[in-house]
Image: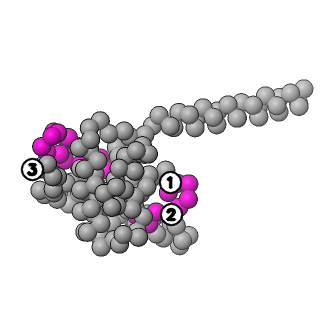
Amino acid sequence: MRKSVHILATAWVVVVCFALTANSAHHVYTPKDPNEVDIFSTVLSAEVKANNWTKRDLICFSVNALDPDKKLVKDIRLHGLNVCSSADWRRSFSCGFQVDFQIIDLALPEAARIRAGVADFRDINTGEGDLAILVRSGEYSLHRTEGKWSVAEYVPAK
């Protein structure tokens, strides 16, 4: 009887683990418009410049507290940015920095507002710290002129 209960419990754990893995695959952010890739790339480029990051610095990012889908990550890499999904950091602790996007308004095709929060994970990665350090947080206003997105304004969070 004890062996049967152990087998049933093990089977239940396996089923739950596979269900959680399958369910987490549905919790990714997929852009609804091709402009979103350019918008996120523009904001990430602004953060790279503002924080003096190098091209070697790996940046993890999320959108609306969701991991970006693989295609979004790939498309942003095509803009010359060294990025990966936040899920990659949770698996390998390889990202030095994290950018969390929160979409405020995507009045596509001409304007957008995105909140970006930046954290430094380097101390966690090395085991020297337990918490990420908030580097900066603020809201970007972007405008599209002649097919190119640019930052119109950045307002730091208070």
Residue in the image at 34% along x and 43% along y: 64
Kindly report the distance in space between the C-alpha atoms of the residues bearing marks 3 and 2.
37 Å
Residue 94, labelled with which disc?
A: 2
Q: Marks 1 and 2, Cα distance to the nearest angstrom?
A: 8 Å
Residue 116 in the image: above or below residue 106: below
Q: Which residue is drawn at 86% across and 27% down?
A: 4
Residue type indicated by callout 1: Asp
Callout 1 touching callout 2 (CB < 8 Å): yes
- Which disc, if any, is residue 44? none
Under circle 3, the secondary element is: loop
- Gap in angstroms between the C-alphas marked 3 and 1: 35 Å
Q: In the figure, 12 relative to 89: above or below?
A: above
Residue drawn 51% across the image and 37% down it = 24
Q: In which quarter of the image is residue 19?
A: top right
The earlier-in-sequence mark between 1 and 2 is 1
Horizontal side of residue 58 vs 39, given as left or right: right
Q: Which of marks 3 and 1 is in front?
A: 3
Asked which secondary structure carries label 1, the reply is helix
Question: Which of the numbered marks, if any, corresponds to residue 88?
Answer: 1
Q: Quadrant of the C terminus?
A: bottom left
Q: Residue at x 24, y 56 (%)?
A: 42
In the image, residue 39 lies at what x, y percent?
24, 50
Determine crowd level at label 3: few under 14, some 14-19, many 20+ residues with C-alpha closer than 10 A.
Answer: few
Question: Is 27 placed left or right of 45 in the picture?
Answer: right
Q: Give the range drawn in magenta.
A: 88-114
